[in-house]
Image (spheres, rainbow, N blue to C red):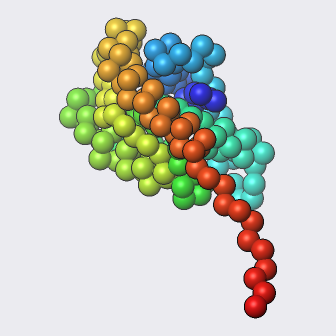
Amino acid sequence: MSSLVALVGNPRGGSRTRLAAVAAAEALGSRIGHAAPPEVVDLSALGPHLFTPGPSPSVEVALELVAGSSVLVVASPTYKATYTGLLKAFLDRLPGGALTGTVALPLLVMGDARHALAVELHLRPVLVELGALVPTPGLALRESEIPELDRVLGGWADRVAPQVIAQVAAQATAQVTTPVPAPQGKVTA
């Protein structure tokens, strides 16, 4: 596997969302054989650059890191029963199909369990639209579960790791077995 990335869509630096995203990526990484710590794209540091006209080197690097990931944990707090506008602004900068071949795992941190469906109704579809493979249900993490993060994420990672391993292996096989088209030459009659 080439990379494991945690994308954090909270506008506040040092957030519980970041804590949960990194812990989720680490828990998953340990179960899928990814020994290196996950790369982290924290949008709180990129927010001002996402809303300015013209390119931003830091945003471009973040977009490349996310688009080049093999496994991507996408985390956001729940705002207005969905994910943050900051995350939406970042994802909108990715071209269609940018996450093709990436296994994505959506995660929403929420104050109230009534918002649990938001991860499936709002975050999963945008990831699929960008071409990501989303092989497991998203994780709806209640703020009250943060003190028990190791236990909660351990059980989650145990459940999703087999599907992630299978999808990563299938993607690797598809890349190896996909024939490269021969260059087209001129046909003369």
The residue sitting at 48% across, 19% down in the picture is 32
The residue sitting at 65% across, 44% down in the picture is 63
From the image, which quarter does the C terminus lie in?
bottom right
Q: In this view, does 24 lie above or below 116?
A: above
Report x, y in % for residue 67: 61, 44
104 to the left or right of 140: right
Looking at the rendered structure, the number of numbered marks drawn on it comes to: 0
Q: Quadrant of residue 79?
A: top left
The residue sitting at 40% across, 22% down in the picture is 161
Residue farthest toward the front in the current orientation of the protein: 189
131 to the left or right of 157: right
Q: In this view, does 122 lie above or below 106?
A: below
Report x, y in % for residue 46: 66, 39
Q: In this view, does 3 lie above or below 47?
A: above
The residue sitting at 47% across, 45% down in the picture is 132
Residue 23 visible (yes or no): no
Residue farthest toward the left in the current orientation of the protein: 114
Q: Quadrant of residue 119?
A: top left
Asked whether 133 or 18 is in front, the reply is: 133
Residue farthest toward the bottom in the current orientation of the protein: 189
Q: Is residue 149 above or below residue 182?
A: above
Asked whether 176 or 167 is in front, the reply is: 176
Report x, y in % for residue 127: 45, 47
Residue 61 visible (yes or no): yes
Report x, y in % for residue 147: 37, 9
From the image, which quarter does the N terminus lie in?
top right
25 to the left or right of 63: left
